[in-house]
Image (cartoon, rainbow, N blue to C red):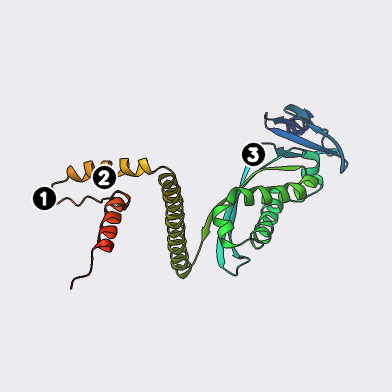
Amino acid sequence: MSMYPVIAVIVIIVLIILLSSIKILREYDRGVVFLFGRFQAVKGPGIIILVPIMQQMVRVDLRTIVVEVPPQDVISRDNVPVKVNAMILYRVIDPEKAVIQVEDAREATSQLAQTTLRSVLGRHELDEMLSEREKLNADIQGILDQHTDAWGIKVSNVEIKQVDLEESMYRAISRQAEAERQRRAKIINAEGELQASEKLMQAAQTLMGQPQSIQLRYLQTLVEVAGDKTTTIVFPLPLDLLEPLLGKLRRSAGNTPPAP
C-alpha cells in the first residue's frame, strides 16, 4: 500500500496548523498573548506567530469607541422627572488590563455610564441640567475615568445629548422664563429712573450754586420752544428779577394814607 496519501494528509494538516498560528494585526490592533492560560505579552502590530495549543491570543482594538447611553429616567434635585441620553467616547490604553481585569470592556463601560449619569444628574436641579451641560459632562467624565482606569480604559469625552421633559413642564418653564424677563425689565427700568434722578439732583445743585446758569437755561428753553410750530409761547420769568419791583410796590402801598 502506498504511503503517499498518508504523507499528503499529514503535510496538509501541518500546513493548516502553521497557517492558523500566523496572525496579522493592523496598526490599531494589539494581541494579548497567553501561554498555557497565563499572560505572556502584548504583541503587535504586524505578523504574530503563535505556538499551536500552547499559546492563545485575544485581539484588542485601540481606536476610539463610541457608546450610546440609552435614555435614562432621572429625577432632579427639585423633583422634576426627565429623560436624559448621552454619548461616551473611550479607548483602550492598556490592552492587558482591558482583557484580564474586565470581561467585556464595552458593556462594562456602558453600564457604568448609565448608573453614573443617573447619580450625577440626580444631584442637580433642572436649570443646571439645561444651562450647565459642560460642567455636568466634565463631572461624569471624571467619575467614569476614575473607575475605568483599573480596566485600562481612558474616557476621553462625555456629551449629554438631550434632556426630555413632559409637556406640562415645558409650559411651566415658559411661564418661569416670562416672569424672569419681566423681573429683569422692571429692575432695569428702576435702575434707569434712579440714575436719572441722581443726575437731575446734581444738575439742580449746580444751578443753585450759579444763578447765571439759570438765566442761560431760560434762554436755551426759549430757543427750543420758539422752534416748535406753536402760536403761544409761555416764558418763565424768574422771581428774583421781579423782587425789587415788588418791594417798591409794597413800600408805596404802605406809605399811602388810608381813604377817608
Q: Residue 224 lies in what quarter of the image?
A: top left
- Nearer the observer, disc 3 or disc 1? 1
State the image coordinates of residue 16 (x, y, percent, origin top left): 73, 33
Q: Which of marks 3 and 1 is nearer the N terminus?
A: 3
- The residue shown at (67%, 51%) is 140
Q: Residue beneath label 3, please?
A: 64
Q: Is residue 174 above or below residue 9?
A: below
What amino acid is found at the position of numbered circle 1 in the picture?
Thr
State the image coordinates of residue 37 (x, y, percent, origin top left): 87, 44
Q: Which of marks 3 and 2 is nearer the N terminus?
A: 3
Q: Residues within 10 Å of mark 2 (few under 14, many from 20)?
A: few
Q: In this view, does 39 lie above or below 164?
A: above
Asked if disc 3 and disc 1 are in contact, CB closer than 8 Å, the reply is: no
Q: How far apart are marks 3 and 1 (CA)?
A: 83 Å
Q: In this view, does 157 lie above or below 120?
A: above
- The residue shown at (63%, 60%) is 124
Mark 3 residue element? loop
Q: Residue beneath label 1, please?
A: 231
Q: Distance between the residues labelled 3 and 2?
A: 76 Å
Instruction: Work out whether residue 143 or residue 206 is closer to the camera in this orientation and state it.
Output: 206
Mark 1 residue element? loop
State the image coordinates of residue 142 (x, y, percent, origin top left): 71, 48
What amino acid is found at the position of numbered circle 2 in the picture?
Thr
Residue 85 visible: yes
Which label belongs to residue 221?
Answer: 2
